[in-house]
Structure formats: C-alpha cells, structure tokens
Image (cartoon, rainbow, N blue to C red):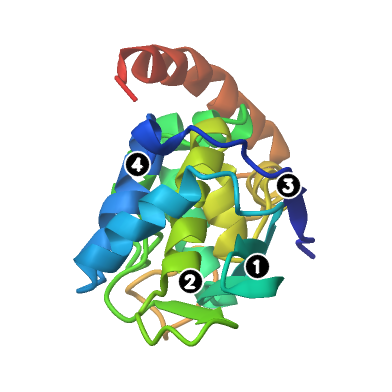
Amino acid sequence: MSVARGFPAFPASRGTAARGRSWWARAWVAAVEDTSLEHTTLRRSRRVAGSGRVGPITVSPGKLAAAVDDPDAPDGLHASVGLAVLTDDEWARLLDQVAAESGHLAALLSGEVPRALVQAADAAGVSLLPGIGDLDPECDCPDWGNPCVHAGALCYQVAWLLDEDPFVLLLLRGRDRDEIVSALSAGPVRRVTGDGPAGADEQAPDDERLAALVERAAGRARALLAADPA
C-alpha cells in the first residue's frame, strides 16, 4: 500500500521558475491552468509559491497538503488539493499497456518516467494529468476561488517536486514507485482482451521471459530517453 511522502518547504525566490523546468512539471502546470478560470488568482498563486510561505508538502494517494503562512491568518492556513486515485482496473489497464511497450517498461523498471507514459495512459483509457473538475482544492481561507490563492500555490510547488521526481504524479494517482516497479517486475500482468468478457485475464510472460524482454529493451529505452528533450 502506498504511503505518504513528505517534502521540505521550498525557500523563497523561486517565482521565476513557477511553472517548473521539466516536461512533467510544465505538463502538470498546463493541466492545472487549463482547468481554472481564475487567472488573476493563479498569478497571485505563483507569487505565493515563490514567497517561501508554503510549508512542507505531504503527498499521498489522492491528496496534496501543506500549511501556508498568511498575513491575514495569524495561526496560518491549511491548504489541500484532492485528485482521484486510479481504480485497480485502471491501474491494470495502464500497466498492461506499459508491459506491451518495451521502451516504457524498461524505463519504468529503471526508475524513469518517460513523457510517452501520457500517451500510453490515453491508449489504456486512463488519465494521468488532471482534467476539468478533477482537482478538489480546500483551504481554511474565505476565498471562494477554485483554487484559492493558497491551494493554487501548492499546485505550482508540485511542479517543482515533479522536476525532481515525476513518480510524485503516480503517487498522487494511487501507487508509489516501489509498487509500480514490483507489479511490472513480478508478473503475471493482467491483460484485458476483446475476445472475452470485460475484465478477463490473460497470463503475461513469466519471470524469465519478462527479464529477457527488459534486457533487450533496456538499451533502446536508454537511447530513447537520451533523445527525449525533457
């Protein structure tokens, strides 16, 4: 079972990089901004994100949370953002799709999250990045914005976490790095086919065949990752 991860507070003066530097960070921010109509609030959120007023962040399946200092709240505020975890069936479809793509499989097994994972998720009928209505912000402040300034600042700081570790997004969606790697390494992988009833299982390659597949794919995956301008 996935457990929460804690991350130290970011220092001030990161406002110039509010949208992050990596492909995953920018994709996350683009998705967050596309789901919000509060563009003025988001500009304020970027300033708060770079102000050093957001405390340590806790990332757990389905939730981001942090305390935020605010001059109008002497005792501080608590902001959180919810994001639905993937169901077991959605995870099964996603991992099945990953197992079918040798480059994706080798990358994840080696601790990398290739940007092509978004396309793999789409092919499996699964959304990794948030869409309209997917984010559920909450805050102690009286602001009715969706998200408010403080929850928005938390979302921008998640981009900085993704700069360092894109697996943060997968944890938000319900599974951590160890669970994903274990599921892909151990087999059998559940495969949903069109020949049987929905949810029918088909045995994936056994451990020896999977190991051979990974070994053959590793070189190709490293080449793909090296050529991928994140």
Side of 139 where 5 appears, left or right = right
Measure the alpha-carbon separation of dots 4 and 1. 23 Å
Measure the alpha-carbon separation of dots 2 and 4. 28 Å
Tag 2: amino acid: Glu
Query: At numbered mark 2, what does the secondary structure look like: helix, strand or loop?
Result: helix
Tag 3: amino acid: Ser
Would you say the residues marked 4 and 3 are in contact, meaning their CB atoms lie under 8 Å apart?
Answer: no
Tag 1: amino acid: Pro
Query: At numbered mark 1, what does the secondary structure look like: helix, strand or loop?
Result: loop
User: Going from the N terminus, do you reach mark 2 or mark 3 first?
Assistant: 2
Side of 79 where 24 appears, left or right = left
Tag 4: amino acid: Arg
Which residue, given by chain and number where applicable, does mark 1 sit on?
Answer: 61
User: Going from the N terminus, do you reach mark 4 or mark 3 first?
Assistant: 4
Side of 91 where 198 appears, left or right = left
Measure the alpha-carbon separation of dots 2 and 1. 15 Å
Measure the alpha-carbon separation of dots 2 and 3. 17 Å
Residue name at image x 42 percent, y 45 percent:
100
Which residue, given by chain and number where applicable, does mark 2 sit on?
Answer: 90
Q: Nearer the viewer, mark 4 or mark 1?
A: 4
Which residue, given by chain and number where applicable, does mark 3 sit on?
Answer: 182
User: Going from the N terminus, do you reach mark 2 or mark 1 first?
Assistant: 1
Measured from the top left, where is residue 36 in percent x and y?
A: 25, 71
Measure the alpha-carbon separation of dots 3 and 1. 17 Å
Query: At numbered mark 3, what does the secondary structure look like: helix, strand or loop?
Result: helix
Residue name at image x 46 percent, y 80 percent:
136
Measured from the top left, where is residue 152 in percent x and y?
A: 42, 64
User: Going from the N terminus, do you reach mark 2 or mark 4 first?
Assistant: 4
Q: Nearer the viewer, residue 1 or 197?
A: 1
Task: Please say if 61 is above or below 104.
Answer: below
Which residue, given by chain and number where applicable, does mark 4 sit on?
Answer: 19
User: Going from the N terminus, do you reach mark 4 or mark 1 first?
Assistant: 4
